[in-house]
Image: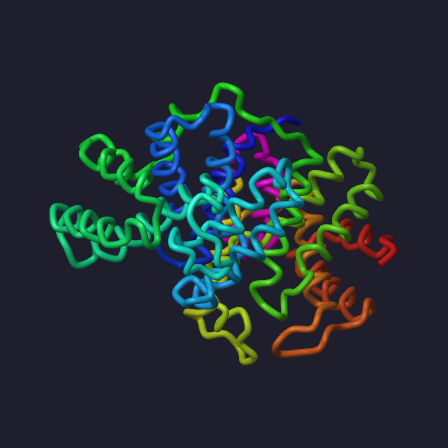
Amino acid sequence: MLLDYFKLLSALSLSLDILERRNFGHARKVAYVAIRLARNLNIKRDEEYKIFYSAFLHDIGKSDVYEDFYSNNTWVHSLRGSDMVKDMPRGHEFSDIIKYHHENWDGSGYFHINGNSIPFEAQIIYLADQFDVKYNTVSITMNEYRTRKHIEKWLNDKSGKSFNPIIVNALKDLMKQEKFWLDYEHYDTFDVLRPYISNETMIVDIDDLSKIARVFSNIIDNKSHFTYKHSKGISEVAYKAALISGYDEMTAKKVKIAGLLHDLGKLAIPNEILDKSDKLTEEEFMIIKSHTYYTKKILMEIGGIDDIAEWAANHHEKLDGSGYPEGLTGEDLDDISRLMAVCDMYQALTEDRPYRAGMSHIEAVNIIYKLVKLNKIDGRSLEIIKEVEL
């Protein structure tokens, strides 16, 4: 299995956008502005991939928008993100770009480095990032003409302070082109980005995808104290269960990845709901149910992993059609989707949650067995889980 790294990161970047709960498509817009700046500044084509990948991953270190995105502690997610990408394919090549992507040109940033001591790619990402944040903030109250004029004044004010004057001038040149604005404001920035991608797009295999999935599972699990290690837990259970079921190693690896990413859509769910100790209201439960929809939407954008996307998204479906998000029935659910549902339920029952302590193995199995008798959960999958050495 071979995947386009650009397309993979572009899709997964949407999960970082929904974590911020605003400015959907932020990473893609930053990538567009950054690559246009790189071309304008005559960056070598074989170095452009660093800017692309850094743009998609620049906010990977965030755990919650209110923690640092709108505070003065932007260095927190920069430093955390820099460490996280080291575990991804070629991540060491753009780790420093992410680390320094909030450094000010005049040296007033957290790391107190200035001018050309800051990696040039990081300077580009910083300006592209702040441009998108400023645009989305100002455009709420201003029309298009006034927004553009306001941004031009803002750039003049920040030039030589926050941003490299050379990069500011390059952006101002781009802003004179109507095409730049129309592409930037386009509803599907991915289509706009595609012509700017190098012909030598990096390809990743199943093991690379596993590394990337582990990084993103950390983001998912760290969002809430009570889901800590949940994704890792279900991935291990599902992997072992797949092997016991007789699937080959490649399929078992795919199942493991589905386990790591099954709750990707939970990044869209507010923590006050995820961490609520009381029973959820109907409205809150409706919001919770949306997470499987977002999981599938994001993973299907990658292309080439439709099976993983289905297995990851179907973990709350029931055999009798009472599950979500699609209300699928037993006829629609393959064996691995059924297995994933049992793995997720078992893992959730045996973990501590805001409203109860984790259950024992026997207690969890007994509860799931009751659902088997009600034709909601697959009995054969439960028998397989009972064989897994936990």
Whole-percent x and y of residue 241?
79, 47
The residue sitting at 73% across, 61% down in the picture is 346
Viewer-closest of 234 and 327: 234
The residue sitting at 38% across, 54% down in the picture is 106
Question: Is-magenta flag for residue 304?
Answer: yes
Determine if residue 124 is in view. Answer: yes
Viewer-closest of 12 and 371: 12
179 lies left or right of 268: left
Stretch in magenta: 300-327
The residue sitting at 56% across, 56% down in the picture is 79
Viewer-closest of 18 and 313: 18
Q: Which quadrant is the C terminus positioned in?
A: bottom right
Whole-percent x and y of residue 39?
36, 27
Whole-percent x and y of residue 133?
32, 53
Relative to 355, say whether 324 is above or below.
above
The residue sitting at 38% across, 23% down in the picture is 195
Relative to 248, say whether 23 is above or below.
below
Colouring method of the image: rainbow
For the stretch drawn in magenta, the main secondary structure is loop
Residue 37 figure quarter = top left
Whole-percent x and y of residue 350?
74, 68
Q: Which quadrant is the N terminus positioned in?
A: top right
Viewer-closest of 308 and 58: 58
